[in-house]
Image: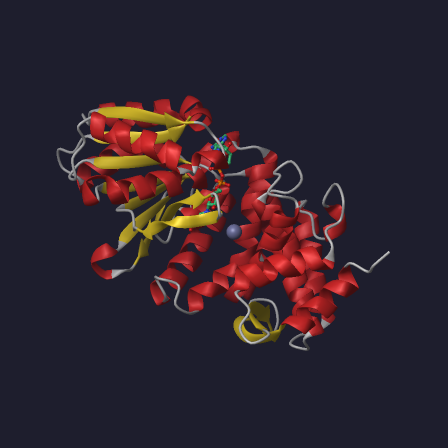
């Protein structure tokens, strides 16, 4: 990307379900023309959360007005609690009450919560209507808006109800991230670093040199979002429905999810991206423990994430430390132990991760015991 206001486009190549991701500062103000070009004569229903709508809903509505697209807005409360049946019903009801048809378009304006919820609603109203993702958090721009996983939580667990439902377009305005909290910005950055660690060592090295510019905004931030979207698009293209290699996107997530569960998903103590940051350091240390790489690899990961300002060890989570048993039981649940073995994403080096299907449960336990020695 050459100048600050240039947008770049990445194609998610999934045949007749393929779509563009347009990334850059200011693309939200151009949403109307993009949508008018894709869906001639369609009306639009915006689904957003109250926080995001107050900050950025006006820009989107002005843009739709300029392209003569009529629209209504359905708002949900901000936060993970909105990913449930009750709020889904409100959204679906708002769309139906507004008389929106299959050929109209639902615009999901918000973070991953809105994207997952509204994308699912678009998939089930009238057996499926058009939808566009307008991700406004860093995590949503580099992860949740790309790839077509949509859904809500069950009281029995996260993301258990949903659909693979690809959007028709993703518009990621990197300037809207200026209003995102510092903590959410860092949490999203963990997923950016993850793409480098999965299979893009040059990108990881670029991040080591340019992370301050990525946080500052402008061209470096848009570049980091674009490379991340390309990385996710490549993985999704190779394995859309997560039958094999898409599991690589879970690098750091097995440990990360176990830490999130151990704090009972208390976002005051740990947000997802922070769990992923600690989880990625642990995954690299565990790869060393399993003799797949030397200790310097995890050291490099730790040094970078620490330099960025992310937590890198279990000790940094406020409150009581989780026990090895607590972590082991959620890892076993997450991964469905088969004959005493677990599937893990391990690595041979920076950007050389792989799916390991035969990791002995005992090896994970003995590794965690080195991290959490009994007092
Ligand atoms: N579908 C997928 O593939 C996928 C992948 C990863 C995560 N997810 C899901 O994504 C969700 C997390 O997404 P998230 O981290 O974006 O959370 P979120 O949607 O709750 O957004 C975080 C907070 O930031 C606020 N916010 C968003 N954009 C803002 C902006 N530009 N300015 C100011 N505030 C803003 C929101 O109101 C919210 O309070 C989880 O439910 C997770 O399960 C889905
Ligand atoms: Zn994640």
How many numbered tags mark residues here? 0
The residue most toward the right is: 375
Q: Is residue 215 above or below residue 223?
A: above
Rendered image coloring scheme = secondary structure
- In terms of depth relative to the viewer, which is nearer, 299 or 92? 92
- In terms of depth relative to the viewer, which is nearer, 108 or 123? 123
Q: Is residue 190 above or below residue 129?
A: below
Residue under the point 44% across and 44% down: 153
Q: Is residue 1 left or right of residue 266?
A: left
Q: Is residue 218 above or below residue 336?
A: above
Residue under the point 54% across and 74% down: 356
Quadrant (top left/top right/bottom left/bottom right) for the C terminus: bottom right
Q: Is residue 209 in view? A: no
Q: Is residue 277 left or right of residue 85?
A: right
Residue 280, image quadrant: bottom right
Q: Measured from the top left, where is residue 253 in percent x and y?
A: 56, 57
Q: Is residue 240 above or below residue 86?
A: below
The residue most toward the left is: 41
Q: Measured from the top left, where is residue 76 in percent x and y?
A: 40, 28
- In terms of depth relative to the viewer, which is nearer, 343 or 67? 343
Q: Is residue 152 in view? A: yes
Q: Measured from the top left, where is residue 3 in percent x and y?
A: 42, 42
Q: Measured from the top left, where is residue 295 in percent x and y?
A: 73, 70
Q: Is residue 135 left or right of residue 290?
A: left
């Amino acid at each position: 990307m050459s100048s600050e206001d240039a947008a770049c486009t990445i194609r998610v190549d999934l045949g007749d379900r393929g779509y563009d991701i347009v990334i850059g500062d200011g693309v939200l103000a151009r949403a109307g023309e993009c949508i008018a070009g894709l869906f001639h004569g369609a009306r639009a229903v915006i689904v957003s959360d109250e926080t995001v709508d107050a900050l950025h809903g006006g820009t989107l509505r002005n843009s739709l007005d300029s392209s003569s697209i009529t629209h209504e807005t359905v708002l949900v409360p901000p936060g993970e609690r909105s990913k449930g049946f009750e709020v889904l019903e409100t959204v679906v009801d708002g769309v139906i009450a507004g008389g929106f048809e299959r050929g109209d378009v639902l615009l999901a304006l918000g973070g991953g919560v809105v994207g997952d919820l509204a994308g699912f609603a678009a998939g089930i109203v009238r057996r499926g209507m058009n939808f566009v993702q307008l991700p406004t958090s860093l995590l949503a721009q580099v992860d949740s808006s790309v790839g077509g996983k949509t859904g809500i939580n069950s009281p029995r667990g996260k993301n258990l109800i949903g659909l693979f439902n690809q959007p028709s377009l993703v518009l990621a305005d990197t300037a809207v991230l200026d209003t995102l909290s510092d903590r959410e910005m860092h949490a999203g950055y963990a997923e950016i670093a993850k793409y480098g660690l999965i299979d893009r060592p040059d990108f990881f090295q670029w991040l080591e040199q340019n992370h301050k510019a990525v946080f500052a905004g402008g061209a470096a931030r848009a570049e980091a979002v674009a490379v991340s979207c390309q990385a996710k698009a490549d993985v999704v293209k190779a394995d859309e429905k997560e039958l094999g290699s898409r599991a690589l996107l879970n690098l750091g997530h097995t440990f990360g999810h176990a830490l999130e569960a151990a704090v009972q998903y208390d976002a005051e103590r740990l947000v997802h991206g922070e769990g992923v940051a600690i989880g990625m350091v642990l995954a690299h240390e565990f790869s060393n423990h399993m003799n797949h790489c030397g200790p310097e690899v995890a050291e490099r990961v730790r040094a970078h994430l620490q330099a960025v300002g992310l937590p890198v060890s279990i000790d940094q989570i406020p409150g009581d430390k989780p026990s090895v048993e607590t972590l082991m039981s959620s890892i076993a649940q997450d991964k469905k132990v088969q004959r005493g073995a677990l599937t893990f994403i391990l690595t041979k080096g920076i950007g050389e991760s792989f799916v390991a299907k035969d990791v002995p449960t005992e090896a994970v336990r003995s590794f965690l015991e080195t991290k959490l020695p009994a007092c």
